[in-house]
Amino acid sequence: MTQLGLGLDLSTKRTRKREFLDEMRRVVPWSRLIALIEPHYPKGKTGRPPFPIATMLQIHFMQQWFSLSDPAMEEALYDVPLYRDFAGLDEGMTRLPDESTILRFRHLLETHGLAAQMLTLVNEILSEKGLLLKSGSAVDATLIPAPSSTKNGSGTRDPEMHQTKKGNQWYFGMKAHVGVDAESGLVHTVIGTAANVHDINAAEALLHGQETDVYADAGYQGIEKRCEADAVRWHIAMRPGRRRQLDLSDRLDAIYDQIERLKAGIRAKVEHPFRVLKQQFGYTKTRYRGLMKNTAQITTLFALGNLWMARKALRKA
């Protein structure tokens, strides 16, 4: 154990990062995720033996939690004993995963669509624990900026990203569309599109098919006419300008205002996973080129975000 000259044990301090990793070590369903990846993982019959799936998965998740690139993750494994300990890398090992090994593991997950399967698996576990209900959903989208610089190998911006205007500000990047459980706020569906795709175009694809009620903001006005699911009741927010015109001294308008407040309280659940994505995990800008790679990363982050938001209930269960 690393110690200072006075015999101080550096592992005695329960830092926030150590507490976070200990928490996630307990709630992530490691064995079931490893079983999901194992059929696609190289067996290593020739050359150097591959690192265990558990080690590579733990490293991959630390990348997501701490917003680290492949080279930065390699350096962190050398610099931070806590990271090596979490990944099960003993001090006596002759090598650590380099950035190419980390990149190949990420590409393996992308090639086989395992990020979406991880989200499905996590949600199955949450459903088994009674934490994910099926009666209602809320849908929304958030903008994820992409690097607009052309100082790269191709000399161009990412061709799969696009610019769009929100308010008086222009954004270049993509959108993450999500469908969340209206009761718990846990994400059940994720779709990545270019930033200029209107929210309403992805709305129906965000439903899991078992909900009876769906809540959305005013940007989804008119979705009732497009949706083919007749059993679904859409609860769309009133446009802000129309709501400001309500006369709260009028009994009927006061009722309308109260209904809008109730709908807004339910829709607010969709903001919780966005907060975890951007504030807890620090994901504020796309890292890769192309929608597929970035959508895979976002899907992984939402799967991990579900476990983070449900951690207390999972521990009790």
Image (spheres, helix red, strand yellow):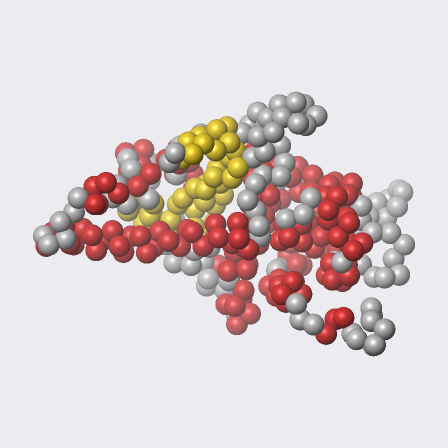
**Residue 179 in view here:** yes
Residue 83, horizontal then vertical, whole percent: 73, 58
User: Residue 67 or 30: which is nearer the viewer?
Assistant: 67
Q: Is residue 302 above or below residue 22?
A: above
Q: Residue at x 32, y 56 (%)?
A: 265
Give the number of callouts.
Answer: 0
Residue 180, horizontal then vertical, whole percent: 43, 50
Residue 68, horizontal then vertical, whole percent: 67, 47
Q: Is residue 184 above or below residue 219?
A: below
User: Residue 16 or 259: which is nearer the viewer?
Assistant: 16
**Residue 212 in view here:** no
Toward the top, the furthest residue is: 155
Q: Residue at x 39, y 45 (%)?
A: 139
Toward the left, the furthest residue is: 250
Q: Residue at x 48, y 50 (%)?
A: 274
Q: Is residue 110 above or below residue 278?
A: above
Placement of the N terminus among the 4 image quadrants: bottom right
User: Residue 280 or 229: which is nearer the viewer?
Assistant: 280
Q: Residue at x 63, y 48 (%)?
A: 67
